[in-house]
Amino acid sequence: MKVCLLLLLLTIYQFAFGWGFYAHRQINYYAVFLLPPEMLAFYKPNLPFISEHAVDPDKRRYMIAAEGPRHYIDIDRYGNYPYDSLPRTWFAAVEKYTADTLMAYGIVPWWIQTMQQRLTHAFETHNATAILKLSAEIGHYIADAHVPLHACSNHNGQFTDQRGIHGFWESRIPELLAATEWDFFIGKAAYIDQPLSFTWQRVLESAIAADTVLKYEKQLSRQFSPDRRFAFEEHNGVLVKQYSTAYTRTYNQLLNDMVERRMRQSIYAVASFWYTAWVNAGQPDLKQLLPVQFSLGDSTAFQALEQQWRNGSVKGKICD
């Protein structure tokens, strides 16, 4: 009996954030290879950092409550698609709804804009460590904007008796299929003339896809008994209860490979935002910034973040 209880406690995806850690790391990893040679010379030697620290924003949710709203926007709180009542610029939105309201429902489009400005400044000032940290983290927020349930107040199916669907879509599916069956040869990064408009376009795509994500899982759940829907399978060397392989594959087919498409779009968008920041900063010679040396303060901050993530609890809104 105790063994069974222990196994149940090991169920993954208890909390849903952005893409799961695996997918976030892969998105940043593949984005590096879309960069032009002048940027690749800097980013490729630092590929382990760019990939590993893609998950820092999720870990920071264990430190500060203000981090949570940066990952999503419950855009359906503002009416119906295409949500014209919500101004697209931050100051206009604040004037209409107040900053407190925006924070309550999520600010991911505007936070990406803030991060883009910071990254551009880091390139302008030739701040190598800031370039790496901001590149890794903006990649996280851009990827989150591509997740349908990050643009929906029913973010984990809590209103439709579908708790767990958030992690199912963004973690279980890519962990099962991405490495062996998906294609991430995408092309090259492109300059984005209007990053905020680009971001809003991707957010609206996510918002309109949210109903499909919820509808097909609800339909599928009626066709699979609980003992077929879930299974105890090995995950990173640990036996865990998770959505079964058969259920996951069937759901992915019903979605017509939506998760792969959104992951590919995320990779392209991340690389293009990095490239745009570099171009807007005057295309500095990044080879002159190698090798990158992090300060003792940086190392201490990374260690504190890791410790808080492992031992703390999520601050603010939880997608449970």
Image (cartoon, rainbow, N blue to C red):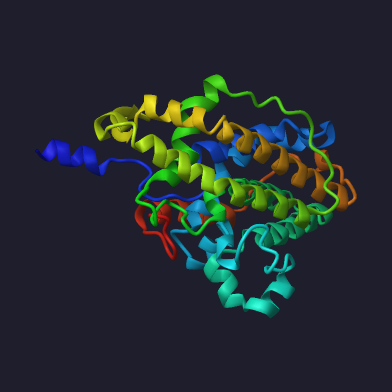
Which residue is pictured at 35% across the width and 41% down the height?
Answer: 12
Q: Position of residue 282 (x, y in %)?
A: 90, 50
Question: Is residue 289 something that shows in the picture?
Answer: no
Q: Position of residue 13 (x, y in %)?
A: 38, 44
Q: In the figure, 33 relative to 117: above or below?
A: above
Task: Look at the image and tell me in which quarter the C terminus lies.
Answer: bottom left
Which residue is pictured at 42% across the width and 30% down the height?
Answer: 248
Which residue is pictured at 59% across the width and 71% down the height?
Answer: 102
Question: Is residue 276 something that shows in the picture?
Answer: yes
Which residue is pictured at 50% across the width and 42% down the height?
Answer: 213
Q: In the figure, 184 relative to 193: above or below?
A: above
User: In the displayed structure, does residue 313 sit left or right of residue 183?
Assistant: left
User: In the displayed structure, does residue 25 sit left or right of residue 186?
Assistant: left
Q: Position of residue 3 (x, y in %)?
A: 14, 36
Q: In the figure, 35 relative to 316: above or below?
A: above
User: In the displayed structure, does residue 179 sit left or right of residue 192?
Assistant: left
**Which residue appears farthest toward the right when viewing the image?**
282
Task: Look at the image and tell me in which quarter the N terminus lies.
Answer: top left
Q: In the figure, 299 relative to 24: above or below?
A: below
**Which residue appears farthest toward the top when viewing the image?**
180
Could you say which is closer to the camera, residue 277 or residue 42? 277
**Which residue appears farthest toward the left when viewing the image?**
1
Could you say which is closer to the camera, residue 9 or residue 29? 9
Q: Position of residue 277 (x, y in %)?
A: 80, 50
Could you say which is closer to the camera, residue 145 or residue 276? 145
Q: How many marks?
A: 0
